[in-house]
Image (spheres, rainbow, N blue to C red):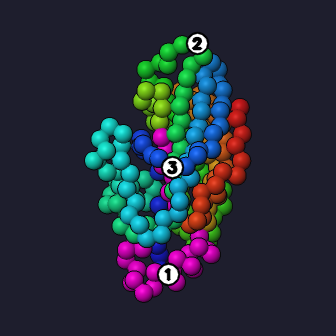
Amino acid sequence: MRLPLLSLFPMALMATAAEPQHHTFATGDYIITMDVHFLDPYVGKRLAFYTGTDPRNEICLVGNGEAGACPKRFVGAVATVTFTVKRASGKLRGKTSIREYVTVTSQSPDLPPRPPLDKTQVLTNGAISDLQAFGYDESDIAEGEREAERQKSKERLWRLCHQELYLNGQTVPFATISWRYTLDAIEILRVQGR
């Protein structure tokens, strides 16, 4: 059975979670903070997020971040990452942006290959957010088979990724992050600042 997997899709969001993991980076006269919230695992729940500008407007993503119907019975892990950028010498320029380049370094053989992700986002009020999800929608699996599929998938589905982060078109990343994705958790394995 091929399960559609959701993974690493950035989008401007507002999210709430427990105490975040906090990292600070510096490049030039910019100070960049990264707050990571690791949400509780989803076990057959609807996966939808909302923007801060209109809390009634749902953000539903599938696959590698394409817009689509919200997964009705998502099984997997979710994390939100918020970047805040400040300039030591004053005001941010109008089009301050962060570019992420993400490659898969290793993954379980059951997963289809995933091309590199190269995405740039412009900051709004000095911040952007990134949603990361790894899992599948079990809606098309018969209810009596869902628990067995969950157990089998937990044992066999995982992915390791390398993320490079660039500010304003710079050619040297201000940070590199190694991530591990399983159905139970998204984890940061290593963070390296410039």
Q: Quadrant of residue 161?
A: bottom right
Figure check: 172 above or below 154: above
The residue wearing badge 3 is: 17
Asked which secondary structure carries label 1, the reply is helix
Q: CA distance from mark 2 to mark 1?
A: 55 Å
The residue wearing badge 2 is: 89
Which one is closest to the eye, mark 3 or mark 1? 3
In the image, what residue type sits under mark 1? Glu
Is residue 117 visible in the rendered structure shown here?
A: no
Pick out the residue farthest to the bottom: 144
Front residue (pair 33, 103): 33
In the image, what residue type sits under mark 2? Ser
Q: CA distance from mark 3 to mark 1?
A: 26 Å
Number of residues whose C-alpha sits closer than 10 Å to that of mark 3, classed few (under 14), some (14–19) or many (20 or more): few
- The spot of residue 69 in percent (x, y) is 31, 60
Is 139 positioned to the left or the right of 174 in the image?
left
Which one is closest to the eye, mark 2 or mark 1? 1
- The spot of residue 166 in percent (x, y) is 58, 33
Asked which secondary structure carries label 2, the reply is loop
- The spot of residue 152 in percent (x, y) is 57, 80
The residue wearing badge 1 is: 147
- Say which label, 3 or 2, has the lower sequence index: 3
Front residue (pair 18, 73): 18
154 falls in the magenta region: yes
Figure check: 184 above or below 178: below
